[in-house]
Amino acid sequence: MRELSTHAGQATRWWVLPLVAAAQLLVVLDGTIVNIALPSAHADLGLGDETRHWVISAYLLAFGGLLLIGGRVSGAIGHRRAFVVGLLGFAGASFIGGLAWSPAVLIGARALQGVFAALLAPAALSLLSVSFSDPAERGRAFGVFAAVGATGSAIGLVLGGLLTEFASWRWCLYVNVPIALLAAAGAVLIPRVAPLPRTGRVDVLGAALSAAGLAAIVVGVSQIEAHAGLSPTVIALLAGGIVLLALFIRVERSASNPLLPLSVLASRARAGSFIAVALMFLAMFGFYLFMSYYTQSELGYSPVQAGMVLLIHAIAALAGSMLIAGRLLGRVSPTPLILSGLLSAAAGLFIARWIEVDSAHVLTFYLVPAMVLTGIGMGLVIASTASTATHGVRGHEIGAASATFNASQQLGAAIGVALLNTVAVMAARAHTADASSAEATINGYSTALTVGTGSLLAAAAIAGLLLRASHIAATDDHEVRRGEGY
């Protein structure tokens, strides 16, 4: 039985899009919405300096570490059912987080949000992918999806500033509840479908190895700053994570019902898309962090003003994903769109690295151009890679492909925040003796943004090698479904 009937009406199919967009907004927005709210939560709950980063890290770790499992579960119970369960669970976890009476409850609620996001995200992308097979419709649908993904992080910072300043930091969590409940109620418009038949035992060992390996790498990177470099603890975590992931690949080769069918990674175009979007998120989440600190700490902006600067990025991302990628996908190969997006974002970060301690023209000469270029680039990359990542995937593997795409984003973001922040702190310390505190801080930001620029240029080079037009022709999406049940 097909996951979504090919006879579903035009109106029903297009109803899937706003529901998937709402789910995507939730999972992306919650990666950043609490950033600006952290000082208020710290004052209210007594978060310690050594634990407050876990309010962010707990979500990213649970989300990124469990996405492959979430994709497998989504395929097993049916993407529609997984979509609803994920939304309801996310709403419940958000409500608990808003009520949090201690640091442990808040951090636990954030981790629980990540658990349900790991089920919700692949289910949403799978529904979108199987709902839109026509190349032109697929381009428009993925343009909207990418617009939400590209702007959600910046919107989270804007909304977090507004809610914290005019309501309470708790509303940064409560705000998820009505969105999730409305989307869950709207899911009745999606045709009821049967889950894919089970063909073997659940890959428990693969699930444990993947989750532990990804978590070890993210935690290891996050500990570099605390240990002032590659300490034995950091090396052990990173090496252990790599070993666990190598074991995971070995287990998947022989598993009768693998968590991640290796055929999903066999496509050069699909692998290139995963790498491109991971490095994009690595660079951009570090960029968000530095711009939030720079505008507030160095320029004296309020949380709302800092968020409004990032709103420029969000608007540019809408243009890149909907006006450019949304119109061109299905007509041209995604390859030039992805390459253009990566180079545009690299140019934006390169401009941002020249920010100054105190300048009357910093907004006009540096921040606005950087926000526009990074926004357009991110919109192009997310729209094009989301389409490519699920292109040509057989019905029983689409959940795994969707989960891998989302995992690439979340792990790139988690590693980017930890890695680029570490680079910034170390570079600032190295210049403290020769410059003022503010100048040393700016030097740290500039150094980290240079590293981010390099990661985007590396992504463009890799994408240029892997994303060959002959592998992802613009007009053969019908092969995704030929002979396959959904």
Image (spheres, rainbow, N blue to C red):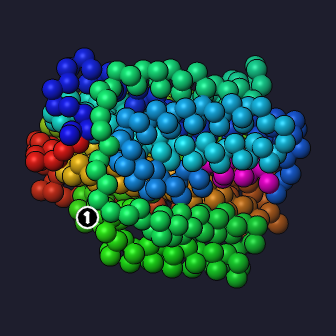
Range drawn in magenta? 51-59
Nearer to the camera, 273 or 132: 132
Give percent across and percent down for residue 335: 23, 50
Give percent across and percent down for residue 170: 75, 29
Give percent across and percent down for residue 161: 69, 29
Nearer to the camera, 289 or 134: 134
Q: Which of the 4 image quarters holds residue 301?
A: top right
Name of the residue lying farthest toward the bottom: 232
Is residue 133 something one can see in this rendering?
yes
Relative to 417, is 101 on the left or the right?
right
Relative to 485, is 205 on the left or the right?
right
Residue underneath mark 1: 263
Q: Is most of the magenta stretch helix, strand or loop?
A: helix
Give percent across and percent down for residue 245: 47, 73
**Can residue 157 be found in the magenta stretch?**
no
The residue at the point 20 percent across, 31 percent down is 5
Q: Residues within 10 Å of mark 1 (few under 14, many from 20)?
A: few
The residue at the point 58 percent across, 78 percent down is 240
Quarter of the picture holding the N terminus: top left
Name of the residue lying farthest toward the top: 11
Q: How many discs mark residues in the rendered view?
A: 1
The residue at the point 64 percent across, 80 percent down is 236
Relative to 124, is 354 on the left or the right?
right
Quarter of the picture holding the C terminus: top left
The residue at the point 33 percent across, 26 percent down is 190
Relative to 233, is 329 on the left or the right?
left
Name the secondary structure under disc 1. Answer: helix
Is residue 366 something one can see in this rendering?
no
Q: Which of the 4 image quarters holds residue 400?
A: bottom left
Give the amino acid type for the residue marked by disc 1 in the picture: Ser
**Can residue 52 be found in the magenta stretch?**
yes
